[in-house]
Image (spheres, helix red, strand yellow):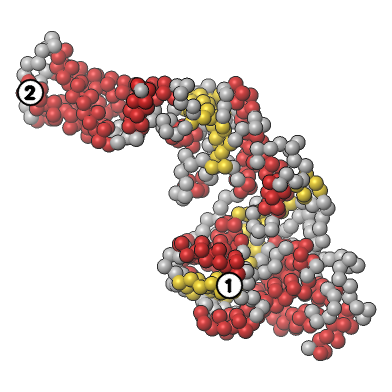
Amino acid sequence: MVRAHLIRLAQILFNRRPLFIYIFQTALVAASVVLAWLLRFDFSLPYRRTLLTSGLLLVVIRLITLSLFKLNHGWWHFASVSDALNILKAVTCGSVAFLTLNRYLLGAMAFPRSVYVMEGVLTACFLASARLTSRVLVESIKRSPSLRLKRVMLVGAGFAAEMVIRELARPDSGYLAVGCVDDDRSKIGIHIQGVPVLGTIEEVETLVQLNSIDEILIAIPSASGKQMRRITEACQKPKLPFKTVPTLSDVIRGKASVSQFREVRLEDLLGREPVQIDLEAVRKEIAARTVVVTGAAGSIGSELCRQILDYSPGRLICLDQNETGLFFLRLNLEQHKNGAELAFRVVDVCDSGRVRALLSEFMPEVIFHAAAYKHVPMMESNVQEAVKNNVLGLMGLLDLAADAGCESFVLISSDKAVNPTNVMGATKRICELIISSRPVNGMRCVSVRFGNVLGSSGSVIPVLRQQLGNRQPLTITHPEIRRFFMITPEAVALVLQAFAIGRHGDILVLDMGESVRILDLARSLIRLSCMSEQDVEIQFTGLREGEKLNEELFYEHEMVTSTACEKIKRTNGAHRSWPELCRQLDELRASMSIDGAAPIRSKMKEIVPEYSFEEDSKQEETTEMPAESQLQKAAGHS
C-alpha cells in the first residue's frame, strides 16, 4: 500500500502539473524565509508584519526568477549539474532583486540583512534537495522487484540518447535505461543523465549478457545506411529485439519525436536522404487544378494520389483497370481529401473511346501517367501486350490529352530503360523517346526515371518476406545482382518535383547513390526478423530472361545537367526526329499483327539500338516467312 502511494506521488511529479509545481515551490520559498527568520531571532517570530509583507514580495520574485530560468517544468525527470547551475542563477538573481526592491525602494529597513543571505542559501538547498529526492524516489521505485521494467541498452551516446533517457525516466515508460554504447571510445565511463556509457558497439553482445539487458534501442537518428547495417548486425548477435528512433529528417520535419521508437525497417538500412521538395513550386502547379492519375491503384499511383491531395487540387481523377484496387484506394483517400473533389473510374488506358469520353468530361490540366506493365519476366512472354499497353497506350493518351487541353503530362519511367535487355525496359525507353521528341503543341511533357521501389507489389522484398514468413528458402537469382532502391514516398516526391521544375522533353533522374546487392538486403531482412543466416537457406536460381546483373541510370551519350533540386539531374539526350519516330512507331504497330514476338523485338531494336536480346528458340516462334518480309507484308495491309 505504501509503495502504491509512492508510485502515485511519482506519477504526479512526473506529469509536471503546473499548479502542483507552483504550490510546491511557493511552500519551499515560504519555508526558507520563515526558517531563516527563526535562525536569526533564536527560534522566535518577532516583527511578524514585516515578515509577512516582505515574505509575500519574496515569494513573487522567486516564482518569477524560477520561471525565467525554466525551473517551473521538467525538473522531476532528473537531477543534473545543469539544474544546480540554473537554481544557483535563479536564487542569486532573485535575492538581488528582493534586496533592491525591499530595502532600497520600499524602505523595509527592519528586515534583517542576514536573513537575505540565509534565505537564499536555504531556498537553493531546498530546491536542489527536492530534485535529488525525486530522483532517488523514482530510482528506488524502478528497482523494486514488484515493478518489472524492461532493462534497455542504448546504441549511441549523443543528443538523441540524452533525450531518450529523459523520456525513459518517466515512471510510466516501462523501461529502465541501464547503459549506452558508442563508437567514440572517449565517452566510455561518462554518465548521460546518470546512465553510464559502458563500451563500444562491437561489445554489445558481451555487455548485454553482463547487464541482463532485455531490449536494445538504437538512438542514432542521423545514421547512414552503412552505419545502420553494421549496428543491426551487432544488435542481432545477442538475439534480442531492437528498435530505433525515427530518422533525423522525420524529427526535423515534425513527423515524429525522438522518443517514438519503432522497429528497424529496410529503408533505414538504405540510408538515403529524402528528396527535398520545393513545396510552393509544386503547390502552385496543382492547387485548384484538375489532376488525373492513371494506374492510380498501383504502388506509385496510389502514393501519387495521396501526396497530390496535400496540395489542394480542385479535382483528382483516379483511373485504373483494377476495380478492387480502386475500391480500397477510394476508402483511403476519402479520409483526407483536403477539400478536393474525387472521382474513381475503371478504365483501360488503351480503350481510346472510353479515355476520350473521360477526358472530355473532366478536362484535366495535369496528367500523371503511371499505368504500365512493369514485371520483366512476365513481359518477356507477353511482348505484344507490353507494347500495346506501355507504348501504344501512351501514344493514344498523349493525343487525347492534347485534344482535351491538358497543360502538363508526366510519364513514369524506369532505370531499365537504360541499355535495356528486356521488353519492359525497351518499351520504357521508347516512351522516353516519345516524350522527349514530341512537339510541344501547348502541352509540356516530362519523363521521370528512377530505380526499384522498395516494397512495391510484386517486387523482390515482398517476395522475400513471404518466403521468410512461410519458412521457405529465400530465392535470389544471382549472388552479385544489384539494384537501385528508393522508398515509395521518395519516388513520388521526385515525380512531383519533376513536374514542377521539368521543361518539355526533359528526362529527370534521381541521384540514387550506390546500388545495393539483393543478397545484402536478404541478409538484412533475416536479421530484422530476429533470425540468423544459419536458420534460413538462401538459394540462387540464376538470372531470368531479360534480367541484368546491374542497372544503370544514364546512357553514356546522355548529357547530364543539374536542376534546382540537388538530388535530381536532367538529361534530354533522347530527342529524335518526330516524323521519323512516328513512322517507326507505325511499323511497330504493324509488326504486332504478325505471329510471334521476333518481328516486334526486331522493330524495337531498330527504334532503340541499345536494346539487346537473345534470339532464343524458347521464345515464341515466328512463321517460316522471314521477319522482315512479314513486317513489309503487314505494313502493306495496314
Q: Is residue 181 above or below residue 488?
A: above
Quarter containing the N terminus: top left
Q: Residue at x 62, y 28 (%)?
A: 204
Q: Residue at x 45, y 34 (%)?
A: 173
Q: Amino acid at mark 1?
A: Leu
> Which secondary structure, mark 2?
helix
Residue 403 position within the rendered picture, expressed as x and y whole percent measured from the top left:
57, 84
Q: Residue at x 72, y 63 (%)?
A: 375
Q: In the rendered image, which residue does mark 1 sit on?
A: 319
Give the image quarter of residue 395.
bottom right
Give the image quarter of residue 633.
bottom right
Residue 252 position within the rendered picture, expressed as x and y whole percent measured from the top left:
47, 47
> Which secondary structure, mark 1?
strand
Total tally of numbered discs in the picture: 2
Instruction: Inspect this view and state whether residue 215 appears.
Output: yes
Mark carried by residue 28: none
Q: In the rendered image, which residue does mark 2 sit on?
A: 50
Q: Amino acid at mark 2?
A: Thr
